[in-house]
Amino acid sequence: MEDSFVVVGGDAAGLSAASKCKREDPERDVVVYERGRWISYAHCGTPYYVKGEVEDLTDLLSLSPEEVEERGIDLRRGREVVDVDSDAKEVEVEDTEGDVTTKSYDDLLIASGARAIESPVAGVELAGAYTLHGLDDAAAIRSHLTPPEEHSVDGFTDEVDVERVRRAGEMEPPTSVAVVGGGYVGVEMAEAFSAWPVDIHLYQRPSQLLPEFGEAVGSQVESHLLERGVELHLDTEVEAIRGDGHVEAVETADSVVTEVEMALVGVGVRANVEPVEDEVELGESGAIEVDRYGRTSAEDVYAAGDCAVSHHTVTDDTAWVPLGLTANRAGRAVGATVAGTETEVGEIAATAMVKAFDLECARTGLVTEEEARRHGYKAESVTVDAGSRSGYYPGAEKTTVTLTADVDTGRLLGGAIVGRDRAAVRIDTVATAVEAELTVRETMNLDLGYAPPFSPVWSPVLVAAKVLDGELNS
Ligand SMILES: Cc1cc2nc3c(=O)[nH]c(=O)nc-3n(C[C@H](O)[C@H](O)[C@H](O)COP(=O)(O)OP(=O)(O)OC[C@H]3O[C@@H](n4cnc5c(N)ncnc54)[C@H](O)[C@@H]3O)c2cc1C
């Protein structure tokens, strides 16, 4: 009997697992089921495709189906795993014609990702209303924004939903768009829309943009978006997108109606767990609970990527933070484990970066005192402005760093950074310190690089650590 490793999902987590397993154990039968046509694509680049900064949709692809097959992986596109029976150790697979077959497995990886949430906003089915989760969404949005005389479906691959792109291209380009949601997708899409001649309204239910990045980042992004002409509606819930067949307006919970011709709903994602939801334990977020090796509660069933939780390095609890590196790393680890080398999927610090027009934003660990207190820490935070380069060197910009520490032990718990000049990548120092469980004093004494064009003598992270160390020891 074949020793099959069956993978559900042909993107970051799924193909990382399949490739690693096949590399480690070339004799293994590795089968990947992908319900769509696209594989190995970069969701993360889709806002920049809509903006036009990334020219071709195919630039967002990494491996081609042929390259995957050259690795000895049996890739089956247009095949949806609709059910898992973990007692019989088999999956039920439906093809695009609706025909269903079964396939037995020795090891199974669920790497089915997540999907964009549409509810509670009504009207997302109207023409001109979009979510952004995949290349077809991005292609349709850019096609709708493009003037008819410039519109063409030439140059796309066979994978794209040509009919959808054509339909979107037949609509008049909008003159106004509502972005619903001020998380990272909403903020990135506001920037993307700014490259087109449209008025942009951004609606955010909380009073702050990018809430997970803390107040200092949120307030600077707010001012910057206003400067860049985005009309912000904070503390405002959109109840419905209105229109007769196509988007004509958005209506808020306070019954304020604003006319718009396009809407982008970016209010979060939900884990795709349907085929396996009765077989494995799910967490509060709805994502699949896994141990440190990506094992679910069902024997020989693993989960990795956006459909699964991770272990948080600071809280020591599970957390659902669906991001790219987490998916690639967890998939790769599961691939190694099923090939015979037990490998931990690694912890997360929920490190994330976002570009908001000219501002770079980043966060890691527990950013605010409130967040740290929710996890049982007696916390202290500081927010400090420092220069990005020596003050006399051209290009120096304000960099704002928030650091948060545990008052009892002095351990650095997390932080956030915002600025215009290579601010976001500085978070990697903070993330490393958080994962290494450094104290604020140890962080303050790190030997970081200095040269006027790159960083001042005291880098913004060191300046913030010095100030926080002073607070903790005052
Ligand atoms: C607009 C956008 C921007 C982003 N930007 C960033 C960023 O800047 N940085 C970052 O770290 N992360 C970012 N992310 C998140 C990142 O893209 C995801 O974390 C990553 O793609 C997760 O990979 P995955 O393999 O778990 O899931 P996915 O990439 O979603 O792949 C899952 C695959 O499984 C398939 N599938 C689902 N169910 C089935 C089934 N039953 N049978 C067969 N196939 C199935 C799906 O069709 C899909 O192809 C962004 C996401 C979006 C949407």
Image (cartoon, helix red, strand yellow):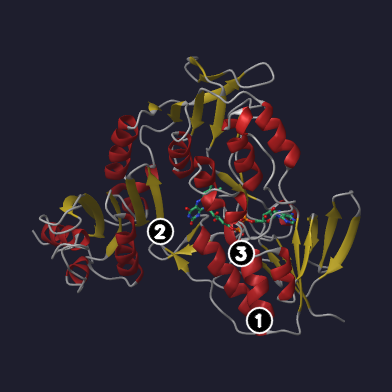
Please name the residue that numbered disc 1 is placed on. 23
- Closest to the observer: 332 or 137? 137
Residue at the spot 46% in from the left edge and 62% down from the top edge: 317
Image position of 5 with respect to 98: above or below: below
Question: Left of 352 or right of it: where is 465?
Answer: left
Q: Dot 2 corresponds to which residue? A: 351
Q: Position of residue 271 (x, y in %)?
A: 62, 51
Position of residue 180 relative to residue 210, above or below, is: above
Q: Quadrant of ligand 1?
A: bottom right
Task: Give coordinates of residue 245: x percent, y percent.
Answer: 69, 20
Q: Nearer the viewer, residue 364 or 142?
A: 142
Q: Residue at x 68, y 48 (%)?
A: 156
Give the residue type that dot 2 points to: Thr
Name the residue at 51% across, 26% down: 177
Q: Which residue is mark 3?
A: 13
Q: Nearer the viewer, mark 3 or mark 1?
A: 1
Between the residue at mark 3 and the residue at mark 1, the CA separation in whole angstroms equals 15 Å
